[in-house]
């Protein structure tokens, strides 16, 4: 049952407000820790703050304060005065782990992701994104002009998608398809997981040249280069030909309904009548809840300010598919405790 707001606020409510507003500082702290490679330097062992400061070229006392703040958030443990080791959560800020979240943290602490948030009230007033007013170009145009950030974005998307990549091959029978195209598939992390699980299926990763820039080594690592083509293109102009399933993960939420309908319409036209569009997105409930710590709604606003996109409910996905000559056949949560759903749509 949702809280009604009628009870008198108690000490916990006061503490929660303060904790929430300090969240912005926690994000900045994590970004600085990644930029200074604090967790990489600590590694599996224990490091003294003074050694770390000498290695990072930072101010010793300020470094201790930063490390203590990381300990306060549960990312480090101060085992003796001035000596720090990583916690299991903090270890995810190391760059050398296959389950690393360092690029994701770095991206979400970058001004490119945060500055438009300073204009959230404008976006709420107008319903329009603020990114372009701040940076003079749209988000993906900005990435195109900033190669290092674009690489970080691709790696961040890959890190964010690995949890889904572990679940999707089991949640969906890809064995029914001959060729699966991952439209806006980035570095191919998700499609590689599907192709590993289904050795008879072929793949196409379709993205912009910048989106595909890190895909070669991902496919190569899994020995998939012979079974998976990389096709550069613009999904507002066309979808790739030759596939009987089009996968779209975390693509439609980047775009408005009108733009999403264009992308889906191209997919529909490129697919045979027995083909399928497989949309993997967070599906919002009809009324707001506190599930997943409210992250789906923060993501929704992130889409608003930075891209002009949105998260959607099932009814909104049905409406969107209907506009594009598709009908939603099923909506399946990928796993308990994971906000992503597989929305399977078929041509009508
Ligand atoms: C939010 S990312 C999602 C990446 C991947 N599907 C995932 O979930 O990790 C959106 C992707 O859309 C790609 N993209 C953006 N504009 C595009 C366009 N006009 N045509 C094709 N791909 C585009 C980006 O390069 C990026 O890889």
Image (tube, rainbow, N blue to C red):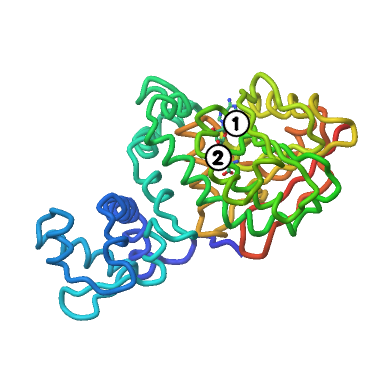
The residue where tag 2 is placed is 215
Say which residue appears at 47% left-offset and 45% top-offset. 155
Does the CB distance between marks 2 and 1 fall below 8 Å? yes
In terms of image quadrants, where is residue 244?
top right
Q: Position of residue 159 (x, y in %)?
A: 50, 51
Say which residue appears at 52% left-offset and 30% top-offset. 308
Mark 2 → mark 1, Cα distance in angstroms: 10 Å
Residue 144: which disc?
none
- Quick check: 22 above or below 256? below
Residue 23 located left or right of residue 186: left
The residue where tag 1 is placed is 207
User: Label 1: few (<14), some or many (≥20) within 10 Å?
Assistant: many
Q: Give the mark nearer the N terminus: 2 vs 1.
A: 1
Nearer the observer, 79 or 10: 79
Q: Position of residue 330 (x, y in %)?
A: 81, 48
Nearer the observer, 284 or 142: 142
Q: Confirm or reject: label 1 Cβ below 8 Å from ligand 1.
A: yes
Nearer the observer, 156 or 321: 156
Quadrant of the rendering where the N terminus is positioned: bottom right
Say which residue appears at 67% left-offset and 49% top-offset. 286
User: Label 2: few (<14), some or many (≥20) within 10 Å?
Assistant: many
Say which residue appears at 43% left-offset and 38% top-offset. 151
């Amino acid at each position: 049952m949702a809280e009604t707001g009628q009870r008198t606020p108690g000490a916990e409510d006061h503490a929660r407000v303060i904790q929430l507003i300090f969240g912005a500082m926690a994000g900045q702290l994590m970004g600085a820790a990644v930029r200074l490679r604090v967790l990489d330097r600590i590694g599996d062992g224990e490091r003294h703050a003074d050694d770390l400061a000498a290695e990072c070229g930072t101010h010793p006392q300020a470094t201790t304060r930063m490390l203590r703040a990381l300990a306060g958030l549960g990312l480090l443990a101060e085992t003796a005065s001035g000596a720090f080791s990583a916690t299991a959560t903090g270890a995810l800020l190391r760059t050398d782990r296959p389950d690393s979240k360092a690029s994701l943290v770095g991206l979400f602490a970058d001004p490119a992701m945060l500055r438009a948030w300073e204009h959230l009230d404008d976006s709420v007033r107008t319903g329009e994104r603020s990114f372009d007013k701040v940076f003079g170009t749209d988000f993906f145009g900005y990435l195109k002009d900033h190669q290092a950030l674009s690489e970080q974005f691709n790696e961040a998307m890959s890190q964010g998608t690995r949890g889904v990549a572990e679940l999707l091959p089991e949640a969906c029978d890809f064995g029914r398809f001959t060729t699966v195209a991952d439209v806006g598939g980035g570095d191919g992390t998700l499609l590689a997981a599907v192709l590993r699980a289904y050795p008879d299926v072929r793949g196409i990763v379709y993205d912009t040249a910048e989106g595909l820039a890190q895909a070669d080594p991902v496919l190569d690592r899994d020995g998939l280069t012979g079974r998976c083509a990389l096709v550069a293109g613009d999904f507002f102009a066309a979808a790739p030909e030759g596939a009987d399933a089009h996968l779209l993960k975390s693509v439609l939420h980047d775009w408005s309904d009108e733009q999403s309908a264009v992308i889906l319409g191209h997919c529909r036209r490129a697919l045979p009548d027995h083909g399928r569009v497989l949309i993997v997105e967070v599906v919002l409930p009809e009324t707001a809840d506190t599930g997943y710590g409210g992250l789906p709604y923060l993501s929704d606003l992130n889409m608003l300010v930075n891209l002009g996109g949105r998260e959607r409910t099932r009814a909104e996905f049905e409406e969107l598919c209907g506009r594009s000559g598709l009908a939603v056949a099923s909506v399946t949560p990928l796993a308990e405790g994971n906000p992503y759903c597989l929305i399977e749509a078929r041509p009508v």
